[in-house]
Amino acid sequence: MKSRHKKLALIVVVLAGLGIAAALVLNAFQSNLVFFFSPTQVANGEAPIERAFRIGGLVEEGSIQRQSDGLSVHFVVTDTARTIPVIYTGILPDLFKEGKGVVAEGRLGGDGVFTATQVLAKHDENYMPPEAAHAVEQAQKAQQTVVE
Amino acid sequence: MKRWVPLVAFLILVGFFAKGLFLNPREVPSPLIDRPAPAFELPLVGNDAASFSPADMRGKVWLLNVWAPWCVSCRQEHPVLMQIAQSGRVSIVGLNWKDRDREAAMLLARSGSPYLAVAEDLDGRVGIDYGVTGTPETYVIDREGFVRMKHIGPISPDVWKQKFEPKLKELGA
Amino acid sequence: MIPELGHFALILALLLALVQSVLPLVGAQRGNRTLMAVARPATQGQFVFVALAFGCLAWSFLANDFSVLNVARNSYSRLPEVYRLTATWGSHEGSLLMWVLILGFWSSAVAIFSRHLPEDMVARVLGIMGLISVGFLAFLLTTSNPFERLVPAAPDGNDLNPLLQDWGMILHPPMLYMGYVGFAVAFAFAIAALLSGKLDAAWARWSRPWTTVAWAFLTLGIVLGSWWAYRELGWGGWWFWDPTENASFMPWIAGTALIHSLAVTEKRGAFKAWTVLLALTAFSLSLLGTFLVRSGVLSSVHAFATDPARGAFILGFLAVVIGGSLVLYAWRAPKMITGGGFSWFSRESLLLANNVILIAALGAVLLGTLYPLFMDAMGLGKISVGPPYFNAVFVPLMAPALFLMGVGPLVRWKEGSLPDAWTRLKWALGVAVVAAVLLPLTLDGFKPWASLGFFLAVWITLAVAVAFRDRLRHGGGSVAHRLGTLPRGFWGMQLAHFGMAVGIAGIAVVANYESERDVRMDVGSYAELAGYTFTFHGASEREGPNYRAARGTLEVTRNGKHVATLHPEKRLYNASGMAMTEAAVHPNLFRDIYVAMGEQLDEQGAWSVRLFHKPFINWLWLGAVFMVVGGFLAASDRRYRIALRRSELPRGLAAQGAGA
């Protein structure tokens, strides 16, 4: 093959490869990005109903209730301004505790209850998940604007 | 010109990293700054009968230092706080945060207390009002009871000189 | 006293690293032999002092010296001795010190095994590695001093994070760093070649075994991390596409592309500029990984481990090292003349396709990892990019590369023949297609992704078999004798490819056919999963050295026959107050039975328990072990030792001798 043809073929192959990669990335991005909302945003109706998303905040003190089957748990996530009830079925992470930061991923039902498919509490004593910290901080800012 | 492509791509990346680096959520200024310090009434460590409330400090510039006996960074700042207390520069009130094992009184008896008083926030509720995300954290509160500054992490002599001193001067303490 | 000695040793190491970098680099530029000769002794000296500092830190941990801040934060008087030792690299400061130690180790290794290299090359390579040492030592001393004192001393420590109290985590960081830092050697060789302007294929030959060894270590490190996460996190997952995992995976992808591209550059003199760029990329991504994990930019993270000063330092260092090397590349690249044409179907073209795919996959992972950061930096909200994105992009991208893996090694350099490849591989292709259809049916129903996995695994395995058959067809003596005469490079490559096939088979099965149940278990009750019956005999209290545990007892039976008795634990660590799930696993070659305790549900001793059946999971680790062994075998090939000697001949002769 002549070197010019070869170069052309090479470029075509490389571009085709990158094109496929880009298409895959865009496609996957569209359906798989998980957005994050704070309880205040959820209460204001900013969160989508059909899509899965993440919420973050603190587990409200005294809100954890085990259901009789032993595996379903109800708890309330708060950003100190608004709260959102959450249902989760399964085993909670080791560091899930009342008064601690938590991030949950799942869907919002029509009744305003968030059904979590995953609960994350990957932190140690001194650490709060950044998303949870963010939610609490935003809520406090907002509260003070209201007070004014 | 394609030989420059990797460099340009990298520089764009560095730009984002630089931005991301200073985007640390922990460094966002506290929403409490220039707002009234949230009120509370908590029992004192070692004396459940007595209590402390920020209102008691009206008319004074003071520091609210959130700490816990289980926190190693707090031990690190302890000698600095001791020096500040001994110099009489400013009063420090401790907020003993989530001390499950009730070790604070013992620890203070052993290593000395820089605090005017230590309020006991066992369940961490006051901590939530103040937006505490970890220990130690220190708030500067002025004569009118407004939060004027928040510092996250231990106070080192450098931090004291560069961050606290100018603020205290400004507030007239 | 000992910690101060360590601190002092670090300062001396920094001074020696400065000597090691400045003098030889100047010497090489000016042709001054005396200055160039400084490189080796300075390198060895620097290594000795860093090792001394590391020893001092380890001593402080073993001796429970809680007047050292680092020890007070990460150790505990009742921590078992072996974990006290490994806590040395459990912290930010300690792990960076280990980074520098390993860099010193690699530099010394280069100093020792480079006797056949031209003096100016050695001086440049060691000088550049010295510059990297300078950066990291300065970082340690200015922002992360591991020997900082705590006054007054803490009465006891905070304990090592319980998650790190495990064998997988003991070995994971050193192996990972051996890989990361090993790419510094390839990086230094590439920069030295750019600096000297001698961009022939010689540097590719010299850096090839180093790169392969670094790649093997990195593979081992990543797999150990995955194995640790699998057993220790109690979730039964082995890969989460978590930013810290991606930070180690991206250099691995670049390194994999690099070892293949180096093969082309060494044997055919082609792809020179590309190979140089890959060598720069592999190490840049290692640095990037260190930056991402250590600065907390991505996970914005453990309280006070994040210090913007640290992040800013690493970012500045990153900008200088990577930016500088890319400027050098842009300046010198036009001088590189690509030699050796090749046809559209040849080993070169197939390796090129492999590289394009790997780099596209790398880009996809990089994008997914950094996208949340971009969004946040632009103020567009907080998002996370989860495993579904990575799976949806990575798997379809890699499939063609894995298919080509079967073809590539059977095609000639320069001018391959498609009909010939077809003749040799058509049976393999047929068998692989049949296997793809039939194998899923022997398991739990047909699943397209599992089918694709089986196809690729069988295809690669058969291609390896064909390669051996072709090699053994000629020559005299018994088959065993002929096998013995095959070069180690060939063995290594085939073994690594076979390991990939084994790993793919493992992933295909475990990802598609695993089963899991969260159940409430009263004492004496049972649950069923994948044909196994789990009977819960209750939990009892147990005292560990630095924790208390509830220790469950579960009996596993299958068709009434006893299989195993498992003891998963829920631990509460005394010093940190952290709870930890210690899963119990009963492994064999075809499946793991994995049990983790949730929490106690009532006073009668009922617990929530998580049961897993993980078919073929161990094939994953086994495949990785083959890849690692293959890497070491390939790097130990005689050819490199001979090639080293030949490099002393005039360049033309050396190039001829290397063509094989």
Image (tube, coloured by chain):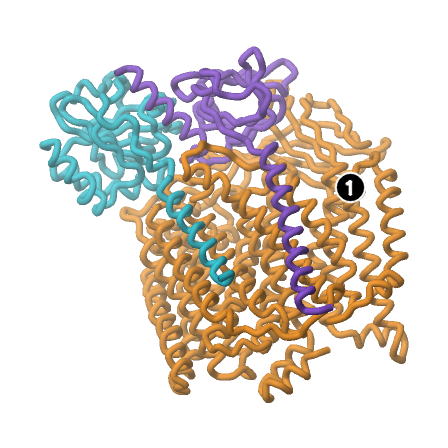
The chain holding disc 1 is C
Q: Give the chain coloured cyan.
A: B
Quadrant of the drawing holding the N terminus of chain C: bottom left
Spot occupied by residue C124 in the image (x, y as percentages of width and height): 45, 76
Spot occupied by residue C33 in the image (x, y as percentages of width and height): 41, 87
Q: Give the left or right position of residue C293, taking residue C605 as reference.
A: left
Disc 1 residue type? Ala
What color is chain A drawn in? purple
What color is chain C drawn in? orange
Residue C239, compared with residue C350, is above or below; it is above
Q: Give the left or right position of residue C416, taking residue A25 as reference.
A: right
Q: Residue at x 87, y 38 (%)?
A: C441
Q: Residue at x 60, y 72 (%)?
A: C338
- Asked whether residue C595 appears in the rendered view, the answer is yes
Callout 1: few (<14), some (14-19), or many (20+) C-alpha neighbours within 10 Å? many
User: Residue beneath label 1, please?
Assistant: C450
Residue C228, compared with residue C21, is above or below; it is above
Spot occupied by residue C578 in the image (x, y as percentages of width and height): 49, 35
Element class at badge 1 = helix
Residue B145, compared with residue C646, is above or below; it is above
Quadrant location of residue C411?
bottom right
Q: Residue at x 42, y 81 (%)?
A: C28
Task: Tell which residue pokes out farthest to the top in this image.
Answer: A111
Residue nearer the viewer, C649 or C178 = C649
Residue nearer the viewer, B64 or C630 = C630
